[in-house]
Amino acid sequence: MKNLGLNILDVDNRKVILDSDNLFWSILPKPDNGSVNLSRNLLSLYDKFKDNLDKEMYDFRFGLDLSAIYIDPTDKCNANCPYCYVPPKIRKYGRSMTKDELEFILNKIYAYRSGDNGLASDRPEGNGLVSFGQTHSQSHRKGSHKKLVIIFHASEPLLVKDIVFYAIEKFKDKFFFGLQTNALLLKQKDVDFLIKHRVGVGISLDSHDPKVNNRLRSGNFNQIVNALDWFDGYSGLNVITTITKYNVTHLEKIVKFLHAKKVSCVLLNPMRFTQKYALKLKPDEKIMAQQFLKAVDTAIELSRNSGRQIIVANFANIILAIVSPFARRLMCDISPCGGGRCFFTITAKGEMIPCGEFIGLKGFSGGNIFSAKRADNIITQALNSKPFNKIRDRFVENVKECNICDFRNICGSPCPAELHSLDKFRQKSVFCDFYKAITRHAFKLIAEGKEEYILRREIMNNLKYEYKI
């Protein structure tokens, strides 16, 4: 990878020294005369670590192995969220898996993980800015004992609760499990089951105001409140808020509401426009940045003053991108994104697609897992398919403006499904200015020493300095 060297950025009342390719950085007070003289110690440290950081970043971006598979056990949904990436026709008339089909898929995944199924060499050929080699992750190979994460997702998986819970019980020793739900069908006994099996659970909530939430989430506010009480501070719970023009000013109050309900993790996710009808809900980008950062600052104060932490997970990932970039787990802000690389989705029909966002888009199936029941390499074939390669071939070095942006390896310029739908696949993120604003704020908070209130405590406890002046 060609390294473009150190740049000097103005952030708040400080100077940030940053190598945008490998994320080596330093924060300095802004001098009165505006000029910065880089110290010999800093330059010596940079020279010492640059090559290793280049290699680590390359491996992280292009050598990560499959760690999670999303399974959509049903296409159907009992809600009608106006920004949903699953087209209404699929949500209304789609199919559901049978118990045997779901069990077949899980057995196929487990056999893949246990077998000799390496992901073939696949490195992007860009516009001459970068030159990549070929490496593999060892965990794709025979003898790997690392558990995959299986996440039941898509429309509403609890519509087929019986087969989902059956699968969790039967395969509990072979996989880690997660579940994303609107909570409309969630009962207290279900919560007890999920906690018992240590399932990671995501619940959607779009406002602290019942009227606004129910307008966006089909009347589930009271059910969510009940569910939050049943979970009672369960560490495996996170709440996802999708930011639209209707709730963009509610973010701070949502954080306060969830903190009072003992929720320790919330994602405040800008909406996607994978389905063009969602464009009418687009929030003002400047207002969204202001309100998002206000919510982040409120979460910091609540965590610091109460002793009970609440983190904004997608902002925490931006902090991690700076202080420990290779510890990131949310794959939307890594380039190329994790779709078709670190994870993929299996739809209710058995189609293997790079990410759930592609469920309503044509031409992105890497094959059907049901179509070749005797083919042991069906997952490998999907990972090496043309649609998956296309997604992995969109990376910031070949996206106009991103290729010269200082923050390109912090935000990752998401989302390829959204941009494909908008006929802008090789263009920058829809919310580019939003990502720039929150990245600048992240550097400010790091300079103030507040990252300990933004990252989960277990992450902070495991971080060690690689370089320090």
Image (spheres, rainbow, N blue to C red):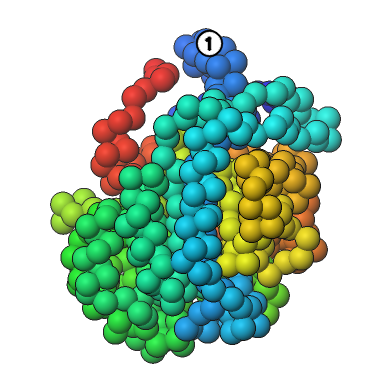
What amino acid is labelled 1 in the image? Lys
Give coordinates of residue 102: x percent, y percent. 50, 61
- Extreme residue in the right direction: 127
Residue lying at 53% horizontally and 84% vertically, measured from the top left: 80
Q: Which of 312 and 126 is in front in this view?
A: 126
Q: Residues within 10 Å of mark 1 (few under 14, many from 20)?
A: few
- The quarter of the picture where the N terminus appears is top right
Residue 236 position by quadrant: bottom left
Residue 420 position by quadrant: bottom right
Residue 311 position by quadrant: bottom left
Q: Which of 39 and 390 is in front in this view?
A: 390
Residue lying at 62% horizontally and 42% vertically, measured from the top left: 376
Q: In this view, does 37 lie to the left or right of 232?
A: right
Give coordinates of residue 408: x percent, y percent. 63, 42
Residue lying at 62% horizontally and 26% vertically, measured from the top left: 136
Give coordinates of residue 250: x percent, y percent. 40, 75
Q: Is residue 212 left or right of residue 97?
A: left
Q: Circle 1 sits on which residue?
A: 48
Q: Can residue 8 be seen in this view?
A: no
